[in-house]
Image: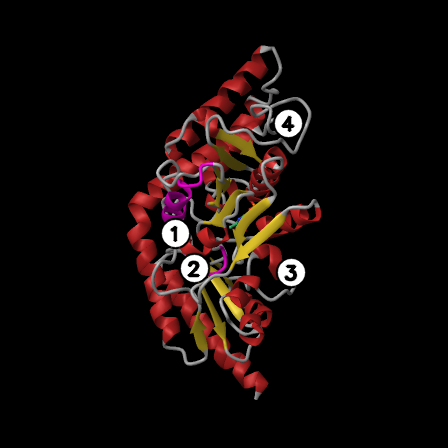
Amino acid sequence: MIYLDNSATTKPYSEVVDSFTKVATDYFGNPSSLHQLGGMAEKLLSQARSQIAKLLHVKDSEILFTSGGTESNNLAIKGTALMYRGRGKHIITTEVEHASIREAMEQLKELGFEITYVHPDQDGRIAVRDIEKEIRNDTILVSVIHVQNEVGTIQPIKEIGTMLKAYPKILFHVDHVQGVGKVPLDIYDCGIDLCSISGHKFHGLNGTGILYLREGLQISPLFSGGNQEFKLRSGTENVPGNVAMAKALRLTMDYYHEKLSLLNEVMQYIKSELEQVPEITIYTPKKGAAPHIVNFSIKGFKGEVFVHALEDKGVFVSTTSACSSRQAAVSKTLLAMGISQDEAKSAIRLSLSYQNTLQEAKKAVKAIKATINQLGEVMK
Ligand SMILES: Cc1ncc(COP(=O)(O)O)c(C=O)c1O
């Protein structure tokens, strides 16, 4: 099997699974319990928080554990909207966000908020001035994705954060889910107030995530109850999952230092081969894209047919983002980039991890070319 769908989810590292098993078996106490087992669980949770804070270069008290990227995005956006609705009801985001941002925004619209979606250029990139143009007196939040999950475009987060310094009442949220361990983000330097991260995108386990929340910043909780996670996210903590996520983050950061050049080489090989195939159009921009995502269409073939044909050859890829691919919806990101409905319907995304090798890339490219020939024959 050649797994090239790492933006949908990643295979957990074996060390991560071992960590989870060990904690779930030996330290299963509830961190809120007063006895020793609870105390040990609490200690492990706070160690995991410290490790993660250190790796992200922020303070322990700024790390909030959640169930993943979707929850972090919802908590960041709705928590801000509910907290600051007295100040204003206008939010700025972009047309190239993940569904967990887009749908959360649409829900806020129903509650009377006004949402401005900023249009990208043909590379899927947002211009800082286009965000600034939309700022109003009642704007309370700007939310922008860091690495676009379908095409890999890197957004100018530092520049947006710098521009927003002139508007201290506007909070800045960044969806960093696809960037972790692949495209560095300096949270403090970029002036970020809230930042979403998901454990299963970097070889942690499903159901684990982080919301970075700048020290001193208040938002409304979405879950009420036992007041865990600084009173912002009630519910018994997922201690084994969070310990495992801390390990996954450390290993991924190590791989970033050791294996980024290999990842670049593998991606470069794939892109240079795909570029030579006449039926293929690559949508991932040549400059300013993450090292692990490439999105392209194959003229005349529906994306989902191609995905299944490749699967028969042992190569696992996806059409759009995993959340949307089952709904057979055309990618809103590709449409926003000016790509036609027909072309968008045949889009394929390959997404790599530090585990993928050049040898796998060669086999995958061979399988893609063979599938084009094979399906082309069938369609004659
Ligand atoms: C950019 C982005 N944000 C948020 C999410 C949602 O993360 P999760 O699957 O952890 O809920 C995803 C998942 O694909 C994503 O790619």
Q: Indicate which disc, 4 or 2, sits on the residue closer to the N terminus.
A: 2
Magenta part of the chain: 149-168
Residues at marks 1 and 3, CA–CA distance in whole angstroms: 30 Å
- Is 36 placed above or below 321 here? above
Q: Nearer the viewer, residue 296 or 117?
A: 117
Q: Do the residues bearing badges 1 and 4 touch, measured as CB atoms within 8 Å?
A: no
Residue 125 numbered mark, or none: 2
Q: Do the residues bearing badges 3 and 2 touch, measured as CB atoms within 8 Å?
A: no
The residue wearing badge 4 is: 234
Mark 3: give few (<14), some (14-19) or many (20+) Cα within 10 Å: few
User: What is the secondary structure assignment of the residue under circle 1?
Assistant: loop
Quadrant of the image containing the C terminus:
bottom right
Which amino acid is tagged 4? Ser
Q: Residue, x 34% and y 40% (percent of image)?
A: 254
Q: Residue, x 40% and y 30% (percent of image)?
A: 58
Q: Residue, x 54% and y 80% (percent of image)?
A: 300
In the rendering, at what x and y percent does residue 164 appear?
42, 43
- Is 193 placed above or below 297 here? above
The residue wearing badge 3 is: 326
Q: Decide if residue 220 is on the left or right side of residue 286.
A: right
| Snapshot quadrant of residue 305 | bottom right
* Residue 42 falls inside the magenta stretch: no
Residues at marks 4 and 2, CA–CA distance in whole angstroms: 36 Å
Mark 2: give few (<14), some (14-19) or many (20+) Cα within 10 Å: many
Q: Indicate which disc, 3 or 2, sits on the residue closer to the N terminus.
A: 2
Q: Ligand 1 closer than 8 Å to the CB at disc 2? A: no
User: What is the secondary structure assignment of the residue under circle 4?
Assistant: loop
Q: Residue, x 56% and y 21% (percent of image)?
A: 27
Mark 1: give few (<14), some (14-19) or many (20+) Cα within 10 Å: some
Which amino acid is tagged 1? Pro
Q: Indicate which disc, 2 or 1, sits on the residue closer to the N terminus.
A: 2
